[in-house]
Image (cartoon, grey):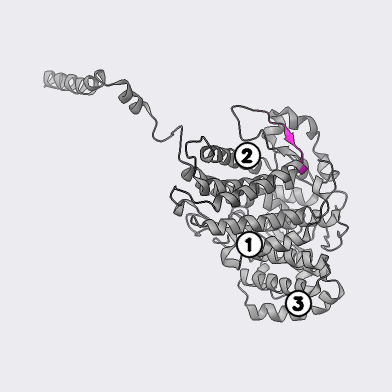
Amino acid sequence: MKTYNLFKQIFLLLALVLPFSSCTEDKMDDINENKNNPEDMQARFIITDAMAKTAFSVTGTDYNYYASVFIEHNVGTYGQMYNAEIRVSEPTSASTYGNAWRSSYECIWYLRIIIDKCSDGGAEEGNYHTMGISQILMAYNIAVLTDLMGDVPWTEAGKPTEIPQPKLDKQEDIYSDIFALLNEGIANLEKESSYASLGTQDLIYGGDADKWIKAAWGLKARYAMRLSHRNPQYRNVIDWVDESFADAGEQFQFNYNGSTTVSPMYKFHQDRLGNLGSSQSLYAKIEERNDPRESKFFLENSGELAPNGKPEQNQAKYGTSALSSPTAPTYLLSYHELQFLKAEAYARLNNTTEALNALSKAITAAFEKVGLTEDEADEYFESIQGRLNTNLLEEIMVQKYLAFYEEESMEAYNDYRRLTAMGNENFIRLSNANNPAKFPKRYTYGDSDVSANENIGSIFGNGSYVYEEPVWWAGGTR
């Protein structure tokens, strides 16, 4: 029996070894290829990862969580959120946004690979639609970074093996590139492509080029308004909104199924229950307008309203959001935002009739977003006529602020800083007593680059610059 087993083992060993002795070099190369970690991948597969990471890890998480505290959509009541609320450590620390910072630059890296592949001389030259979508996503990602941090690595970023310590680019120059990317994206999506549609690999629009074009026009309107302190372009804002979404069904959002994929804000509330509490100042704005969204925003009998700037550090005392759900989408650009942009542009051009028309559409869309009806929106719109007659522009901005609770807090934060630069800081009244001396005018750079990139580390200092220096479009120098 032992002899039989020995011969059996030798036979099996020879059966495994002999075929390899006659393999060609090509065959050996094929065998040595790691199918689970390929060195090259089609652009259509890379872009799916870029979309998911952009929505969940860039827009949906830390950047937005902290913005919701700074802009008083929520109150930080425990842990890191509490520190942000009372302005201790978190706003000035390089580690605060480290995860989101890394995700931003991973997206930029992925998108550079796709654009290179689809450009002239690339492996997928002529894949115009995938390139156009990547250019739009690139514009979006770099805009998120520069809006929050100011001057950031851009032209040398996303090339980790070539340039490990990329230089910082000026925000003014980055904005020129944002508009160029959006224009190039639109042009590429308007071309005929011999490559198959992205289809289900496109997690946002299912490969619909026309909807991506509309998203790009809408982003142009957003970023044109962002620059209104430096270079007002209100007519362009209006025209570009008109080129964008016809209704909320076309808006630029990332959906979750509620089981295998879950809304990041909902996930945060579940995993860190009691870290964010219901905001007194937000509630006051809702209550003084007799706004029917009160029941949609605030969970009844869940706890007290949290005082802005001076809560107890307590996970069980304060109420929590009633709005978040497992399927709440991440809004990269909503239809109601575009209508608010249009309303503001018309108001600044002293066209009251058109401003009111756009505002009515914005409020209706914002109400429908939280499950209220068009009739309820119309009734509410009539009820705030006195405010609109007294100060139309201010009420437009307050209504936009309310509509952005809570998945769109990052945009509310951007709006507040822009309005402050334009002399409209009293439009959105914040209650945290740490303001204005310690209102974060920007976010800190990520810790990975503060420690590893001397171009960033040399200007970071102790992080206190976030309280002192606005970004360029808000009147700063960097």
Residue type (three-letter) at the residue carrying disc 3? Asn
Picture quadrant of residue 162 = top right
The residue at which mark 3 appears reads as: 290
How many residues crowd mark 3 within 10 Å: few (<14), some (14–19), many (20+)? few
Residue shown at 43%/50% (left/top)? 196
Tag 1: residue type?
Ser
* Magenta region: 164-172
Q: In the image, what residue occupies the spot 77% across and 71% down?
A: 355
Residue 148 versus residue 23: which sits nearer the camera? 23
> Does residue 226 show up?
yes
Give the Cα separation between the discs numbered 3 and 2. Answer: 43 Å
> On screen, 424 above or below 445?
below
Which comes before the other along the chain, label 1 or label 3? Answer: 1
Q: Quadrant of the C terminus?
A: top right
Q: Position of residue 230 (x, y in %)?
A: 83, 51
In the rendered structure, which amino acid carries the disc numbered 2?
Tyr
Q: Of circles 1 and 3, which is in front? A: 1
Q: Secondary structure at mark 2?
A: helix
First in sequence: mark 3 vs mark 2 = 2
Q: Which residue is mark 2?
A: 105
Q: Residues within 10 Å of mark 2 (few under 14, many from 20)?
A: many
In the visual, does 26 lie left or right of 383?
left
* Most foreground residue, 180 or 340: 180
Q: CA distance from mark 2 to mark 1?
A: 28 Å
- Residue 444 spot, x, y in % from top left: 75, 41
Q: Earlier in the sequence, mark 2 or mark 1?
A: 2
- x 75%, y 77%: residue: 290
Q: Nearer the viewer, residue 94 or 125?
A: 125
What residue lies at 67% left-to-right and 60% top-to-bottom? 406
Question: x%, y% of residue 192?
Answer: 49, 51
